[in-house]
Image (cartoon, grey):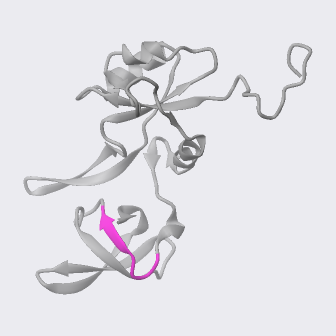
Amino acid sequence: MKDGRVMSVTEPRETDVTWFLAQLKPGGLNKAREHLARQSFEAFMPSHNATIRTRSTLQTVQKPLFPGYLFVGVTPGQVLRPINATRGVSKLVSMDGKNPVRVPQTLIADLQAQTKDGNWTPELERFEIGQGVEIISGPFAGFRARISSIPEADRIYVLLDMIGRLTKISVPRHACVPV
């Protein structure tokens, strides 16, 4: 009950957040997050651990799952116009050039459910024998392979083509994404 009347199921609650996708200016992620927070907008950017090669070493760094974009949550009563003028934000993504496209709540909920401390971890049940994967972290980062077996809950064996020969290696599940 709200203000003496009963809320219907289809009427949005005041706590509901509508999500939009903002395209960022180059290098604008941190500025956008800071300035959106100052304006009481919610910002969501899942990231993942990736291994990069620098000269002769490997480093694990956090990279955005969707580089160049940021999800922006808007509560009822907030106006969208200030988002386009926010530092670090280029524009809200739209299909017709006028009206920003709403991101489905189910997509945001799924991403948030798979994100812990801002770091996205893919669902473990998605892998099957014979499936193609890309290794995103570790010494074989950037390589594509096929799953040969799934013996443990947290590791999988993949067949990696190395110099024309298939080699079976063990990698952590979280180091692979389906392709």
Left or right for 174, reference 143: right
38 or 66: nearer the eye?
66
Name the residue rendered at 40%, 19% in the picture: 34
- Image quadrant in which you'd find residue 131: bottom left
Q: Is residue 146 above or below residue 36?
A: below
Position of residue 131 relative to residue 83, above or below, is below
Identify which residue is drawn at 36% across, 13% down: 85
Q: Which residues are magenta?
A: 128-135
Percent across and percent down for residue 117 are 49, 42
The residue closer to the viewer here, 36 or 138, is: 36
From this view, report whether residue 90 is shown above or below residue 19. above
Q: Residue at x 28, y 25 (%)?
A: 28
Quadrant of residue 27 within the rendered picture: top left
Q: Is residue 130 left or right of residue 59?
A: right
The x, y position of residue 86, in whole percent, is 37, 15
Is 133 magenta? The answer is yes
Asked if residue 4 lies in the magenta stretch, the reply is no
Q: Residue at x 35, y 24 (%)?
A: 91
Q: Residue furthest front?
A: 96
Q: Quadrant of the N terminus?
A: top right
**Front in this rendered view, residue 86 or 154:** 86
Q: Does 76 sit above or below residue 18? A: above
Residue 166 percent location from the top left of the image: 22, 86
Percent across and percent down for residue 73 are 53, 28
